[in-house]
Image (spheres, rainbow, N blue to C red):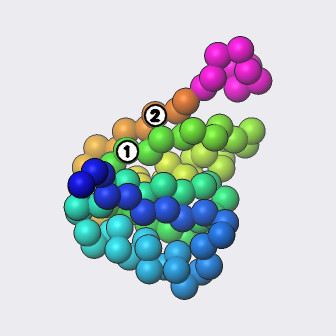
Amino acid sequence: MGIQTLRVDGSVDSVQRSTIISKFQADSSIAALLMTIDSCAVGLTLTNANTVHIVEPQSNPAVEGQAIARAYRLGQTQTVTVIRYITENTVEEI
């Protein structure tokens, strides 16, 4: 029971990462792929995703743009929604 999710972070090696991403792209029963921005920095297509949550804002807007572009790629058939979390009374508000 519950929501099926997969995770990719810095502890996941490149072979595992590729397997996890392929599984996410192929299996629509997986509701979420949790990942750090740094763990999948370049060359990644996630057209099975249609919502991007930025929970760790970056100081460089291009880095966040690249994370968003992973879902918003050629072949994306859904509207992509981006939700950016900013904690009140922190440097993120500036």
> Element type at marker 1?
strand
Count of numbered labels shown in the rendering: 2
Q: What is the residue that sits farthest to the bottom in this orientation?
A: 15
Q: Is residue 41 left or right of residue 33?
A: right
Q: Which numbered tag is attached to residue 51?
A: 1
Q: Is residue 83 left or right of residue 79?
A: right
> Does 89 sit above or below residue 16?
above
Residue range in magenta is: 86-94
79 within the magenta span: no
List the residue tagged with mark 2: 83
Give me the C-alpha separation between circle 1 and circle 2. 8 Å
Percent x, y of residue 22: 38, 76
Closer to the camera in the image, 38 or 76: 38
> Does 19 sit above or below residue 43?
below
The answer to which image quadrant residue 45 occupies is bottom left
Name the residue type under label 2.
Ile
What residue is at 65 percent from the left and 50 percent from the top? 63
Work out whether mark 1 precedes mark 2 in sequence or the reverse, and give the earlier one.
Answer: 1
CB within 8 Å, label 1 to label 2: yes
Mark 2 Cα-neighbour bin, 10 Å: few <14, some 14–19, many ≥20: few
Name the residue type under label 1.
Thr
> Does 14 sit above or below residue 92?
below
Percent x, y of residue 31: 30, 54
Closer to the camera in the image, 87 or 40: 87
Whether residue 70 is visible here, answered yes or no, is no
